[in-house]
Image: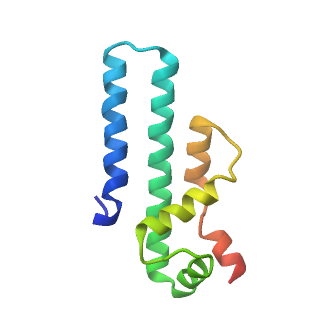
Amino acid sequence: MQNAQDAEYETEIAELQRKLVELQENEAAPALIEEYSAEVRILTALLGAARALDQELQGDPELSSELAMRGFQPTQFREVYAFVYESALDIEKAGSEFAREVELTDFSQPLRETG
């Protein structure tokens, strides 16, 4: 685990993964399995993006200032995740495509554009 602040996100993903395995073992409806699978991929992508942005913020005071000016506390992982989540809402894809777009998105870019 990267740090204690993101433990709850890891726990949520792990719980969904356990449920997904249970659904697969019980041969649940394919649509339900796909729904859980997509949710795991999306949450994993969001967590990865938040971790990447968190790392950038730690090394770039100007980037941290831009995030703070948008009302997010750059020293709190929950706040960094919230920024990534809110920014990701603009991505107009669904399911696995959404997760892939989140993985490909540079969430620091909007902060750099205003700096």
Across and down, in percent, residue 90 comes to: 69, 53
Q: Quadrant of residue 112?
A: bottom right
Image position of 29 with respect to 3: above or below: above
Name the colour scheme: rainbow
Left or right: 23 with respect to 113?
Answer: left
Question: Which residue shows up at 31% across the image and 17% down it?
Answer: 25
Residue at 32% x, 14% y: name it. 26
Counting labels gives 0
Left or right: where 93 falls relative to 78: right
Quadrant occupied by the C terminus: bottom right
Seen at 33% across and 65% down, the residue is: 5
Q: Seen in the image, is 64 located left or right of residue 47? A: right
**Picture quarter containing residue 14?**
top left
Residue closer to the observer: 57 or 35: 35
Residue 2 percent location from the top left of the image: 31, 63
Residue 1 screen position, x and y as percent: 28, 58
Q: Residue at x 45, y 23 (%)?
A: 33
Task: Specify whether residue 76 is in view.
Answer: yes
Considering only vertical position in the picture, is 103 above or below 57?
above
Task: Determine whether 115 is above or below 38 in the image.
Answer: below
Q: Residue furthest front?
A: 71
